[in-house]
Image: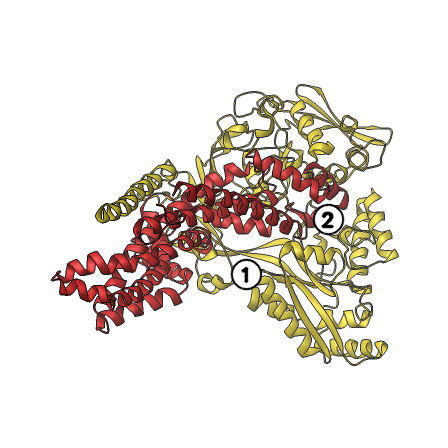
Amino acid sequence: MKKSRWTLVLSLVLVLSVFLSACGGGSNNGGNSGGEGDGEGGSAEQVLNLVETAEIPSMDTTQATDNTSFKAMNQVFEGLYRLDENNEPTLGMAAEEPKEEEKDGETVYTFTIRDDAKWSDGSDVVADDFIYAWHKALNPDTISPYASMFGTAGIKNGNAIITEGDPLYGKVEELGAKAVDEKTLEITVENQVPYFKALLTFATFYPQPKAFAEEQGEKFALESDTMLYNGPFVFAEWNHGEGWTYEKNAEYWDAETVSLEKITTKVVQDTATTVNLYETGKIDRAGLSADFVDQFKDNEEFSTLVDPTMYFMRMNQENEALANKDIRKALYLAYDREGLVNVLLNNGSIAAKYFVPKDFVKGPEGDDFREFAPDGFYADQGEEEAKEAWEAGLEALGTDSVELEFLTTDNELAAKIAEYAKDQFETKLDGLTLTINKQPWKQFLELEDSGDFDISTGGWGPDYPDPMTFLYMFETDGAYNRMGYSSEKYDELVSGAKKETDEAKRWKMMQDAEKVLMEEDIAIIPTYQKGNAILQKDYVKNFYVHSFGADSSYKWVKIEK
Amino acid sequence: MGRYIGGRIISMLITFLIIASLTFFLMKLLPGTPFNNQDKLTETQIVQLNDKYGLNDPVPVQYFNYMKNLISGDLGVSFQQDGREVSTIIGERIGPSAYLGLQSLVVGTIIGLFLGIIAALRHNSFLDYGTMVIAVLGISIPNFVIAGLMQYWLGVKWQLLPVAYWDGFAYTIMPTIAIASIVVATIARFMRTEMLEVLGQDYITTAKAKGLSSTAVVIRHTIRNASIPIITIMGPLVVGLMTGTLVIEQIFVIPGLGEKFVNSILTNDFPIIMGTTLFFSLLFIVVILIVDIMYGIIDPRIRLAGGKS
């Protein structure tokens, strides 16, 4: 009896082991050999192996809000235009540039969709597919987080349809866009914006296959086989949580330009693992964190790229000390940005005393916005001036000490940057005590939104290629102002620039607005423009990185071994 | 025995409902929305999205709806993954976590028991000290350090094993070792202590006096009696392995449930928080029940349900 009980326990263990071996073999061995692109023998097998740091949250073009989704969508879908190597919109689903007609102060664009524009099941991409997706994005029941892009693009009634209380609220059929016939799409614009075409490359403006999407219902775009594709690639596999694989789309109108046959993408969150995978040849491109930059910076495959994402600090002007311009000026000047980018970040980031980034947008004369005050504001002033301003500020406040709280997020880099700021401010400004408050992202936003902070860390990446995507943030009632900043002059310049049709005047107004924000009011402390340190195998050619919208395009990538 | 198990199952269900309710209300205390780009949404958009997902309803109404759906087996859909069903997501992720957790448990337990027995039988010898040094190292070195070192040496430098991914048995070896290290250490120390205690008991002396061989004494009496307390620590170990392998899952790129669990809390993905918490609670409750039943099977002295077995 005793023996039999022991045998039972042992048998259980054995059965469990056999069961486990069976599980392990079965579920994940099938065709997922993501890292086999070692390419021995020198044949230029057109396979690209990549990693992403996050899963794809959504492949529904009306619902996505994040970089990973936008990047994936840019490879498998296409709007009327797509971004090219130089971040310029190039024709996509549109056969040619639209006909333009002025009617009662509105502009009507008539687009013709290519004859050979097909979904991956061979059916035609029609004008109604665009209208279907756009109405879905604006409908209150299926509202897109990026619904405001229709208004941003100036499309007629785009704003009204999503504004509660407006007579047009929810009336999607009132949108200034209609399908004239199968291949003709008419868009009416109530105010022209210079970046209209570039906006049309954004995922919210992609079409969706109406008949197929309706047939799929709630399952649409949840799996690789519940969506259709009209871009250079299709999703061959989508293993949620693990990764996804693209394959060339034979039905794509420009398939002959596409070299890659397959792209594997795995979700890898740990940078050390990414580096190890790169070193063992399992992946062809890897992003590096600052810790790894020194190890690879002399490697031929190492490079840095500058991104148009800006980091800055908000100073809450509800705080008595921070309401004083001298105090704000002292903080602005005391911060050594060079130390931050060269030592702490070490990834090609640029020290910034400006808010609209470098190499982002060009004006009517073809000049970069940043040619205006290229080194930013108070560029030549430093520690001495900071101390003077600090003393003046303290005197005005009638005190010799100030305590401030620095609100930041709990990720590793943010915490290091906060420590750096504390050190910079406390050692240079006598009498200042800075307490760091680290919070998880959601809690951080909650505190910032409710104004429960003195100084907070901020970052902003552009949604569209125009300085306005940065400048509108700090209008008096702007949703992202969050720091009690209000300037009549700034508001006038920004709202003026929104309406101004003369490009040169508009450009000047935006430059003046930035000057008010940075020089006259010192409303924020810009710190750096983001850089990215990258390792990329030398046989990967034409990997294009974009400055807004989707991060990159694989359409033109070639493997040359 | 039957009555005992029946009673236990009823108390399990009650515990489960209490956990579900507590988790629900605690979750509602989390600040912020569950939407991805919360910082870029306007107030109107947040209100619209909340309406869409029923988050503007009063909390008791949300609770009632959730429990109603839960009883009918509907765990809802993820906010972060665009409407995919929670049960599907858990189903996809549980395989790798379960496989890795149980493989580590089996390997770790066998090695741990072996080391513990050797250490006790060779008490105060070089083998004893050596084994205990391994055990102390296993407990004190975090498993992500072991993982990182293995990945660098076995994966990158010597290329003996794949660096990461989840693609067959070879891919499970390094993560299994990393996870099993804590099991080996825990079981070895526990087994050694229990064995030493049993070896000092009178019945061992009696057995020896009866003329039983040393091997028979060790196998029939010592190991068996020393193993009973080990069964008790297995329950929490099993659940701990499944929930506590987050870092290992990240380092070796294993599409498991641990990562989903933590991320759902950081992103306020309410249905996933509820789904994964309930899943882990259920697992914990069931494992404890199994452990109790096994305890009774192995040790006949332990009477269940008022002495009727």
Front in this rendered view, residue B84 or A196: B84
At 47% from the left edge and 46% from the top edge, which residue is drawn? Answer: B257
Front in this rendered view, residue A314 or B34: B34
Asked whether disc 2 touches disc 1, contact meaning CB atoms under 8 Å apart, the reply is no
**The residue under label 1 is which amino acid type?**
Asn
Q: Which residue bears the numbered disc 1?
A: A347
Give the colour chain B carries in the figure: red
Local SS, label 1: loop
- Chain that the image shows in yellow: A
Q: Earlier in the sequence, mark 2 or mark 1?
A: 1
Q: Position of residue B133 (x, y in %)?
A: 31, 70
At 74% from the left edge and 42% from the top edge, which residue is drawn? Answer: B47
Front in this rendered view, residue A162 or B128: B128
**The residue under label 2 is which amino acid type?**
Thr
Furthest-top residue in this view: A181
**In the displayed structure image, the side of residue A220 where residue A561 appears, left or right:** left
Front in this rendered view, residue A464 or A322: A322
**In the displayed structure image, the side of residue A403 where residue A299 appears, left or right:** left
Q: Taking A85 as reference, is A140 above or below it? A: above
**In the displayed structure image, the side of residue A491 where residue A245 appears, left or right:** left
Q: Taking A203 as reference, is B244 above or below it? A: below
Q: Which residue bears the numbered disc 2?
A: A469
